[in-house]
Amino acid sequence: MKDQRILLIISGGIAAYKSLELIRRLREQGATVRCILTQAATEFVTPLSVAALSAQPVYTEIFSLKDESEMGHIRLSREADLVVVAPATGDILAKMVLGIADDLATATLLATNRPVLVAPAMNVHMWHNPATQRNIAQLQKDGVTIVGPAEGPLADGEFGPGRVVEPPVLVEAIRGKLAGLAADDSSAPLRGARVLVTSGPTHEAIDPVRYIANRSSGKQGHAIAAALARLGAQVTLVAGPTQEPNPPGVQTVAVESASQMLAACQAALPTDIAIFAAAVADWRVAEASGDKIKKGATAPSLHLVENPDILATIATAGPRRPKLVIGFAAETDTLIDNARSKLARKNCDWIVANSVARGAVFGQADNLVHLVTASGVEDWPRLSKEEVAERLARRVTDWMKTSGNKDAG
Ligand code: CTP
């Protein structure tokens, strides 16, 4: 959600306090959050706490000289990627349906040309009231996304649907909506492109409880999948075990071992592009024990066999080979030479080479990489893994424009 701008309209209900956590979580994901509070909302949360959490001025009144001079409701409504109403009371939903604009929140909703997502919160009888149900149906027809309400005990002691969805669920819905908007955007430069990305480590079982693994966090591969999806690509992410959340708008296939990763990659073909960021274990135990190995007089010895090379297999897949195949090279020494020989040996088009000397990369936020292609080496500056992902996604976009329908070069 980096660099995404969200206009959050908080209307007056007991659930308004949850918007504070929503703001915090959205900002943690890199979004800028501007807030409008209705008059009733200020009875439940103070503009001061909303301003402190959002680190932005808070807007409350349509005729406030100060608000209007700094930012009118038209600008507020336009300078957002998404307008979110949370919590949305029955009253504000009804006003949205009728186009009533009698305060800053509703005037902004009437003026906006941006997509709108609402998270209703009200008493169960208010929710079931035919008027609310009519309004919800109309809002859906008008293209508004409705998230929730959730079911459970309500503040007034009753039980049923009416609770605003919890902040983590709402954050996911917002992420999904933003990713969907990117994919629907016909100007999205990678619209229509199919991409396979591998990410994370693999776990190779020794017995049911032990495994061989490595220090890969999956941060880089996941960031690449997310960056490509933001540009409109249709991305399949084959991910080994990681703590990273599934990127929004990406089809994620979770695997454990190298063999499973290869099978999932082959199942994802055909694609136009394939990017292999996973740190695949080079070896697996020839025969993993079905039972937990017990301690004995002597330590067991493990017979290792080589894993399939997923990148090399896909890069030599004949007619099913993606047109652009990008590998990673994690090296501790003679970085560029090793990357060049990997480029040839694995039959790939580009190699993103990074130094892993002294564990410099694994789990870290940034990365120092070089892009090695047949035509030369580009030295990139030290960048965050998100920035590396963005830059690689832009390079892929350039490639699509110039040689997407010819050979990779
Ligand atoms: N790779 C793969 N399958 C493997 C091993 C590696 O797909 N079994 C891919 C990685 O995802 C990466 C590239 O190959 O894109 C290079 O990985 P790296 O670990 O640097 O190379 P290795 O093949 O292990 O070669 P070496 O041991 O010589 O460094």
Image: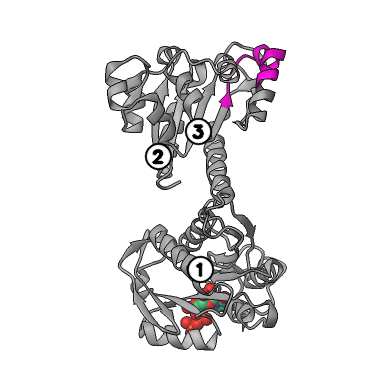
* Residue nearer the viewer, 127 or 188: 188
Asked if residue 64 is positioned above or below residue 56 in the image, the reply reads: above
N-terminal of the pair, mark 1 or mark 2, is: 2
Q: Distance from label 3 to label 2 (Cα)?
A: 23 Å
| Residue 14 at x, y percent in the picture | 50, 16
Q: Amino acid at mark 2?
A: Arg
Q: Which residue is mark 1?
A: 401
Element class at badge 2: helix
Q: Is any atom of residue 18 visible in this view?
A: no
Classified by dominant secondary structure, the portion drawn in magenta counts as: helix
Q: Quadrant of residue 35?
A: top left
Q: Amino acid at mark 1?
A: Lys
Q: Which residue is mark 3?
A: 113
Answer yes or no: disc 1 within 8 Å of ligand 1: no
Q: Residues within 10 Å of mark 1 (few under 14, many from 20)?
A: few
Mark in the foreground, 1 or 2: 1
Left or right of 381: which side holds 375?
Answer: right
At horizontal 28% and vertical 26% (from top left) the residue drawn is 70
Q: Distance from label 1 to label 3 (Cα)?
A: 30 Å
